[in-house]
């Protein structure tokens, strides 16, 4: 945890009571069934989230008006063991069109028992998004810098 | 929720740690200088600084026989915290979805 890499990645894991095949299919083609609804950078409500189950496919939201937001590319698709998608969303929660400024979400599925699967998720290379954070550095001492973030943070903690 | 890393903002949930962090936003400081104005021991300040450093919120550099701590200028903490919240929420919802066979969508 003290390595420099620790600051540029996030890890989560969860154990689900389901066979590995189901754990994999829900995470991929069923992505829209659990994605937090507030995670929406379309201008309208999301009608559905589509996960194209192949390398080179996209994950995208389709709005109720037919508009689309292709916010991830499928980089690896190895059912039922592993899937890797890109994260083509900028720190400002806009679609990132420069692939050099995108991160990766690597998800591995491990069968612990016939009906139990461990899912390990790593969201890595976050520093590739870093350019957008110059504003934070520049404003770090100002009213819009850390003091603002800390107030926002305190509001979250107080909930 | 199982997570094996500390997100920046949750690290700042501790009041003393937040005070230390706020002082570092004013100016880079050594452990001793930080401990002077706080009702906690110098080792406790060191421990808080270590947590802040592991979370990527502060960096340190040697200066003579001391170490000077400063805010990490790359600002990754906020991005990480946002994404950490996203995945915490998503993984919890995922577990609920995957454990309901009746609603399977393929």
Image (cartoon, coloured by chain):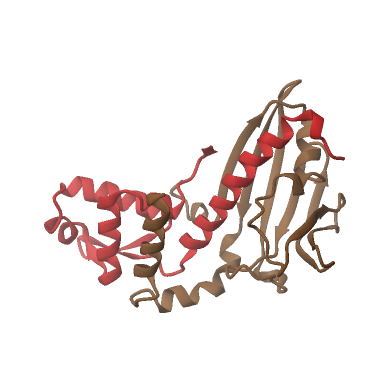
Chain colours: A brown, B red
Residue A8, picture quadrant: bottom right
Q: Position of residue A88 (x, y in %)?
A: 70, 65
Residue at the (51%, 72%) spot, across then down = A133
In the image shown, does A154 or B84 lie closer to the viewer? A154
Classify B31 as above or below A143: above
**Residue B54 visible, this orientation:** no
Number of marks in the image?
0
Q: Is residue B47 left or right of residue A156?
A: left
Would you say residue B86 is visible in this rendering? yes
Whole-percent x and y of residue A59? 79, 57
Q: Quarter of the image containing the C terminus of chain B?
A: top right
Q: Residue at x 34, y 78 (%)?
A: A142
Q: x, y (%) of residue A81?
A: 77, 37
Residue in front for this viewpoint, A129 or A16? A16
Q: Position of residue A23 (x, y in %)?
A: 75, 34
> In this image, A39 relative to A51: left or right?
left
Q: Nearer the viewer, residue A49 or A101?
A: A49
Q: Would you place residue A109 above or below residue B20 in this image?
A: above
Q: Residue at x 39, y 51 (%)?
A: A157
B101 or A139: nearer the eye? B101
**Along the horizontal axis of the image, is A84 left or right of A135?**
right
């Amino acid at each position: 945890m003290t390595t420099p890499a620790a600051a540029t990645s996030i890890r989560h894991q969860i154990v689900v009571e389901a066979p590995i095949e189901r754990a994999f299919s829900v995470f991929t083609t069923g992505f829209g069934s659990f994605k937090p609804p507030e995670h929406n950078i379309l201008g309208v409500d999301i009608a559905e989230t589509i996960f194209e189950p192949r390398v080179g496919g996209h994950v995208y939201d389709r709005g109720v008006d037919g508009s689309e937001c292709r916010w991830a590319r499928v980089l690896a698709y190895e059912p039922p063991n592993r899937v890797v998608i890109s994260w083509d969303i900028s720190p400002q929660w806009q679609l990132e069109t420069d692939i050099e400024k995108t991160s990766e979400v690597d998800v591995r599925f491990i069968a612990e028992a016939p009906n139990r699967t461990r899912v390990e998720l790593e969201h890595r290379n976050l520093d590739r998004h870093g350019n957008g954070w110059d504003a934070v550095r520049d404003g770090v001492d100002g009213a819009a810098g850390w003091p603002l973030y800390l107030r926002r943070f305190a509001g979250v903690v107080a909930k | 929720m199982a997570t094996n890393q500390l997100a920046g903002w949750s690290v700042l949930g501790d009041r003393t740690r937040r005070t230390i962090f706020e002082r570092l936003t004013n100016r880079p400081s050594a452990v001793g200088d930080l401990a002077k104005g706080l009702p906690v021991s110098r080792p406790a300040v060191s421990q808080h600084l270590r947590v802040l450093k592991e979370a990527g919120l502060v960096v340190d550099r040697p200066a003579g026989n001391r170490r000077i701590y400063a805010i990490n200028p790359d600002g990754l903490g906020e991005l990480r915290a946002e994404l950490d919240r996203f995945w915490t929420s998503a993984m919890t919802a995922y577990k609920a979805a995957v454990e309901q066979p009746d609603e399977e969508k393929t």
